[in-house]
Amino acid sequence: MNIIQIPAFTDNYFWLMHENNNKHSVVVDPGACNPILKALDKNNLILSDILITHHHADHIGGINELKKIFPSVNIYGPADKRIPATIIVKDDDIVKLNSLNEEFQVIDVRGHTNSHIAYYFKNKIFCGDTLFSCGCGRLFEGTYNDMHKALTKIKNLPKETMIYCAHEYTLDNIGFAKLLEPNNIHLLEREKEVKKLLKKGLYSVPSKLENELKINPFLRFDNNNIINAVEHHYNKKITNEVDVFKYTREWKDREYD
Ligand code: ZN
Ligand code: FE
């Protein structure tokens, strides 16, 4: 399977996938039409399937125009009036696409929004705005409990899983993570690597779960460095993972960006 990374707007990524010898393709979260048409054209593909993770405009904004050009396109998404899905999928569904020789598993990852889902294929997760490299999505609709649950599901996937998130926020996220773990050598190495990649006009995602577990404060709610940093910052004892996550998220929201 081939995965084409399509940068769009200022920091979004759309993910276009296709098999060799098959003109049919699938795109995840088409927030705009034109960048996708260009990529289809360049690779001589037609669009057969769309996977939607959540309802935000930068993830669904291209659907109407794409539907005009590919009227029979299947649109997979969660049950949510704000998403024009033609095929509704829910947690634990296993779905076979016409365009790929693979089945994907749907994972409920509500938190950023109330109906956010992720798509898991063999060691790849398309997680929208749930998890970013070294960060996670803001909680617009869900509870801290929801998001902690969602991140725990991702955390428990195989370590080789590649995280195909929807934004290039990595460097900014590392800046915050360094407030909590200024001496985390994996974090400092990642910062160097990301700076190099971006300087060359390359991308810092997808990233490997194994490395995220070492650097991402929003997956490290059970790690002593993170617990100590949050307890120190808020000057209180924190006794459970959800609260560690909650205070980490609040810290970033209130004082970082
Ligand atoms: Zn979003
Ligand atoms: Fe987004």
Image: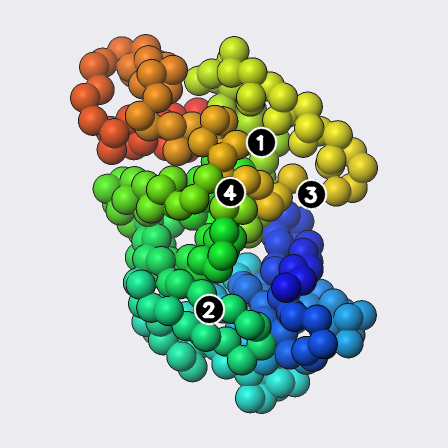
Q: Residues within 10 Å of mark 3 (few under 14, many from 20)?
A: some
Q: Which residue is mark 2?
A: 103
Please name the amino acid that badge 1 sits on.
Asp
The vertical placement of 118 against 52, above or below, is above
> Can you see residue 13?
yes
The image's mark for residue 172 is 1
Furthest-bottom residue in this view:
71
Picture coordinates of residue 236, whole percent (x, y): 22, 14
In the image, is the residue at mark 2 within 8 Å of ligand 1 by its beta carbon? no
Please state which of residues 62 and 108 is positioned toward the viewer in this rendering: 108
Label located before the other in sequence (4 or 2): 2
Q: Nearer the viewer, mark 3 or mark 4?
A: 4
Residue type pointed to by label 2: Glu
Residue under label 4: 160
Closer to the chain start, of discs 3 and 4, is 4
Q: Secondary structure at mark 4?
A: loop
Looking at the rendered structure, which numbered label has been put on residue 203?
3
Dot 2 surroundings within 10 Å: few (below 14), some, or many (20 or more)? Answer: some
- Mark nearest the camera among 3 and 2 is 2
Tag 4–tag 2 contact (CB < 8 Å):
no
Of callouts 3 and 2, the N-terminal one:
2
Marks 3 and 2, how far apart at CA: 27 Å
Task: Determine which quarter of the picture holds residue 199.
Answer: top right
Mark 4–mark 2 Cα distance, whole angstroms, equals 18 Å
Compared across the picture, whether 174 is left or right of 45 comes to left
> Considering only order in the chain, which callout, 2 or 1, is on the residue closer to the N terminus?
2
Q: Nearer the viewer, mark 3 or mark 1?
A: 3
Q: Is mark 4 within 8 Å of ligand 2?
A: no
